[in-house]
Image (tube, rainbow, N blue to C red):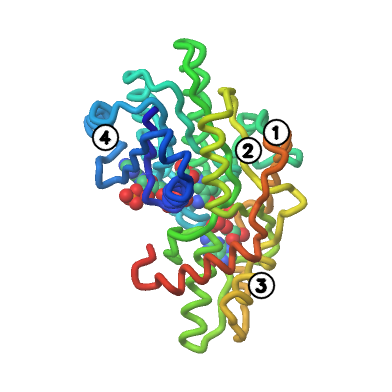
């Protein structure tokens, strides 16, 4: 079996590479092909076709996407929609054309309806409009589920998707303007400490999030690839009990980086969606013994990685 991983030099892709590298069985049993945008632009059908013709994978873990935090989504909703629609349509079409057995694509809990009951589960993706802040990304990601259903109904294919909550870890995008909250906070804390300035957190700090460490997510994605047979998506998340506030995340980052200066909450900036609490019951029924890395350890390890790799980290 040959496993092609798209977007594999991003955060989640690096984590998958690390899990594979440290697992002799995974290395011996499967041939792994890790590609990045340097191997071709997946928005372009000609380049996407060439990648699939060259590698002829039996399985695809599809991570490539235009990804960004709240403030990038607010600015570029149209671009998020168009780029992700093109990438996903090409990857699924050329997987089908090349008779790929299994494709695992990524959705996200931020694509769920804004007005909903909690906890959200896998059956609720299409139940209403997403939060207005990221409608472009959300609708494009929802269409992966539509494509997967289409390939199943029309062609009997086994293409599925996973729904991670907010992810963080080494090799994240630490760009302050465009990245997600945890890498953004780490970068801002690093600079504030270096310059002896206060740390400015955007928004009230009150919104709630379930965070998952990229290395935990990588292990779960590999498990899904070889063990999960449904077309319907599966949420990959810590329990709703482990949901924390942005303020809690700020405290963990500042503690990990030994930051003692003042912390300011800039409430003129958007809070985004207040919460998107997701149920992990489906996952826990199938994989009850999975151990998530405690969040304070995962944040400390990621802060240490960022400081050690400051010069080369994506920022
Ligand atoms: P990431 O670090 O930004 O990695 C995504 C990778 O996709 C990038 O490394 C990029 O490759 C590649 N890519 C983007 N556009 C491409 C194109 N047109 N052609 C080929 N490759 C392209 O993102 P991530 O956080 O690892 O996310 C991985 C997946 O998880 C995505 O599908 C994302 O939607 C999903 N997800 C992420 C989060 C999160 O909190 N980060 C939460 C839920 C779901 P280059 O680096 O070579 O440009
Ligand atoms: P989301 O979970 O999809 O909304 O995306 P983010 O990872 O960007 O998290 C956004 C939440 O973190 C919002 O409540 C923001 O107000 C808050 N936040 C606080 N500081 C920052 C920051 O420096 N960057 C980002 N992206 N969000 C921040």
Near mark 4 (Cα within 10 A), the count class, few <14, some 14-19 or many ≥20, is few
Mark 3 vs 2: CB contact within 8 A? no
Q: Earlier in the sequence, mark 3 or mark 1?
A: 3
- Cα separation, mark 1 vs mark 2, equals 7 Å
Which of the marked residues, 1 or 2, is nearer the chain's N terminus?
A: 2
Q: Which mark is residue 44?
A: 4
Q: Which residue has dot 3 on it? A: 251
From the top left corner, tell me how far across and down residue 310 is, in percent. Answer: 40, 72
Query: What separation in Å lies between label 3 and label 2 (alpha carbons)?
Result: 27 Å
| Secondary structure found at label 1 | helix
Q: Between residues 261 and 133, which one lies in front from this camera angle?
A: 261
Toward which corner of the image does residue 209 lie, by quadrant? Answer: bottom right
Residue labelled 4 has its Cβ within 8 Å of some atom of ligand 1: yes
Q: Write down the quadrant of residue 87 in the picture.
A: top left
Q: Earlier in the sequence, mark 4 or mark 3?
A: 4
Q: Residue at x 30, y 26 (%)?
A: 56
Q: What is the number of callouts on the image? A: 4
The residue carrying mark 1 is 282
Residue, disc 2: 235
Nearer-the-camera pick, 1 or 211? 1
Distance of label 3 from label 1 (alpha carbons): 31 Å
Q: Is residue 57 above or below residue 78?
A: above
Cα gap from disc 4 to disc 3, whole angstroms: 43 Å
Residue at horizontal 41 percent and vertical 34 percent from the top: 30
CA–CA distance in space, label 2 to label 4: 29 Å
Near mark 3 (Cα within 10 A), the count class, few <14, some 14-19 or many ≥20, is: some
Circles 2, 4 touching at the beta carbon (< 8 Å) = no
Q: Earlier in the sequence, mark 1 or mark 4?
A: 4
Answer yes or no: do the residues labelled 1 and 2 have beta carbons within 8 Å? yes
Label 1 CB-ligand 1 distance < 8 A:
no
Does dot 2 land on a helix, a strand or a loop?
Answer: strand
* Residue 155 seen in the current view: yes
């Amino acid at each position: 079996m040959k496993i092609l991983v798209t977007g594999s030099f991003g955060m989640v892709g690096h984590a998958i590479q690390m899990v594979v590298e440290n697992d002799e069985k995974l290395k011996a049993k499967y041939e792994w092909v890790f590609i990045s945008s340097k191997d071709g632009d997946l928005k372009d059908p000609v380049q996407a076709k060439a990648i699939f013709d060259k590698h002829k994978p039996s399985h695809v873990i599809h991570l490539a996407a235009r990804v960004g935090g709240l403030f990038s989504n607010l600015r570029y909703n149209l671009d998020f929609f168009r780029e992700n629609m093109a990438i996903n349509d090409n990857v699924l079409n050329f997987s089908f054309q090349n008779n790929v057995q299994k494709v695992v694509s990524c959705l996200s809990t931020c694509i769920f309806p804004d007005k909903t009951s909690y906890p959200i589960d896998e059956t609720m993706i299409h139940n209403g409009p997403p939060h207005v802040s990221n409608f472009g990304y959300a609708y494009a990601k929802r269409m992966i589920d539509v494509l997967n259903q289409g390939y199943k109904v029309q062609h009997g294919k086994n293409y599925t998707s996973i729904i991670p909550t907010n992810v963080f870890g080494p090799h994240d995008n630490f760009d302050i303007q465009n990245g997600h909250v945890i890498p953004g906070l780490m970068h801002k804390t690093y600079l504030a400490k270096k310059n002896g300035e206060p740390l400015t957190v955007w928004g009230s700090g009150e919104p709630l999030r379930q965070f998952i460490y990229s290395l935990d997510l990588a292990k779960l994605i590999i498990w899904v690839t070889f063990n999960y047979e449904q077309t319907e998506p599966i949420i990959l998340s810590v329990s709703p009990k482990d949901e924390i506030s942005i303020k809690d995340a700020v405290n963990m980052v500042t503690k990990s980086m030994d930051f003692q200066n003042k912390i300011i909450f800039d409430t003129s900036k958007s809070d985004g969606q207040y919460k998107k609490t997701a149920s992990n019951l489906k996952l826990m029924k199938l994989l009850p013994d999975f151990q998530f890395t405690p969040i304070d350890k995962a944040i400390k390890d990621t802060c240490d990685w960022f400081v050690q790799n400051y010069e080369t980290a994506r920022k």
